[in-house]
Amino acid sequence: MHNYLSLNLHICILAHLHIMFQNRVTQLFKIDYPIIQAGMIWASGWKLASAVSNAGALGIIGAGSMYPDILKKHIRKCKAATHKSFGVNLPLLYPDLDEHIKIIIEEGVSIVFTSAGNPKTWTKHFKDQGIKVVHVISSSRFALKAQEAGCDAVVAEGFEAGGHNGREETTTIVLIPAVVNAVSIPVIAAGGIATGRQMFAAMVLGAEGVQVGSRFVASDEASSHDNFKQGVIHAAEGDTQLSLKKLTPVRILKNKFFRLVEEAEKRGASEDELKEILGLARAKTGMKEGNLDEGELEIGQVSALINDVLPAGKIVQNMWQEFNEASNNPVKKYNFTT
Ligand SMILES: Cc1cc2nc3c(=O)[nH]c(=O)nc-3n(C[C@H](O)[C@H](O)[C@H](O)COP(=O)(O)O)c2cc1C
């Protein structure tokens, strides 16, 4: 059921008979729409996650910028704010990882998205507790590793994506079909997806859901600073670039900090020098505290298409509506001549 015709048939039935959309991703997470709000440091706390889940998609708390006690508070507030499914995103290189995992299990979180680490280390531990595990990957090779580790699905994240990024630099449009061919578990597409039409394109390529990051940074409920949200909606094509390739590659807005790193990289700065420039709290300075010059501002290429800050529920609605319209009229902007 992965080809375009069957997808289109699925949506037509949905539009005309008002039946629910279902595929392996909606079934896995018990959600209405196969849209996942990405876990994002300094952006996706309980407010954003619960708003997205209440809108019928899957909200995710980003644990990567939270101390364990803060994560616990966010999980508890999220449980109070929604009765629907939500998840926690856990970068596996996090220093307080053991504590985070303990809290996730104690608090009864049922979905975990892991990233930045080896899926073999923790997947079985989560699965033994009945937790669904999805791992973020940037190549078919890593997708296979995640499948072998027992993950329920993978997020295939392309080069366009905001935040930390694979070294392979494979774009979403190439990565999705490659990963779909490589694994049998569901593939969730990420990187450069902010509209229903982009979502439809990803699904035509074989994805069964989409993980959306940058679009939700520019939402009312995101905990990012207003200055950063304004920076995102004013960004144009070419305003983001992959930086810090010698350390961990990260896609950020080109600001004063970006130029500092660029200049250091050009003169062949060592890893230690780059670490010194990065310092300890650049991401917090930029995304949480709103210092658009000195901060590390993680955002995707798709910021060029984001022009407004909206309620998260409205973002879900808009995407789903446009996805349905696209499925009924996929090539509306073209005139074919013979
Ligand atoms: C501000 C920001 C913070 C992010 N933080 C994380 C994170 O903590 N963990 C993670 O796995 N991915 C993180 N990401 C990547 C997202 O989870 C997601 O895969 C990506 O944003 C998708 O691409 P898009 O930005 O084009 O929608 C972050 C992305 C952004 C924009």
Image (spheres, rainbow, N blue to C red):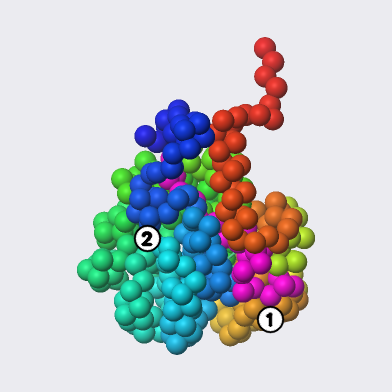
Question: Dot 2 corresponds to which residue?
Answer: 134
Residue 249 occupies quadrant: bottom right
Does dot 2 land on a helix, a strand or a loop?
A: strand
Foreground: 96 or 142? 96
- The kind of secondary structure element at disc 1 is loop
Assess disc 2: are there few (<14), some (14-19) or many (≥20) residues with their C-alpha within 10 Å of its C-alpha.
many
Amino acid type at image mark 2: Val
Residue 91 in view here: no
- Say above or below: 94 vs 252: below
Magenta-colored span = 205-228
Q: Amino acid at mark 1?
A: Glu
Q: Is residue 324 left or right of residue 7?
A: right
Q: Quadrant of the C terminus?
A: top right
Residue 212 colored magenta? Answer: yes
Residue at (56%, 68%) from the top-left corner?
48
Q: Nearer the viewer, residue 108 or 25?
A: 108
Left or right of residue 269, residue 15 in this image: left
What residue would you read off at disc 1? 289
* Figure check: 3 above or below 302: above
Marks 2 and 1, how far apart at CA: 30 Å
Q: Is residue 311 visible?
A: yes
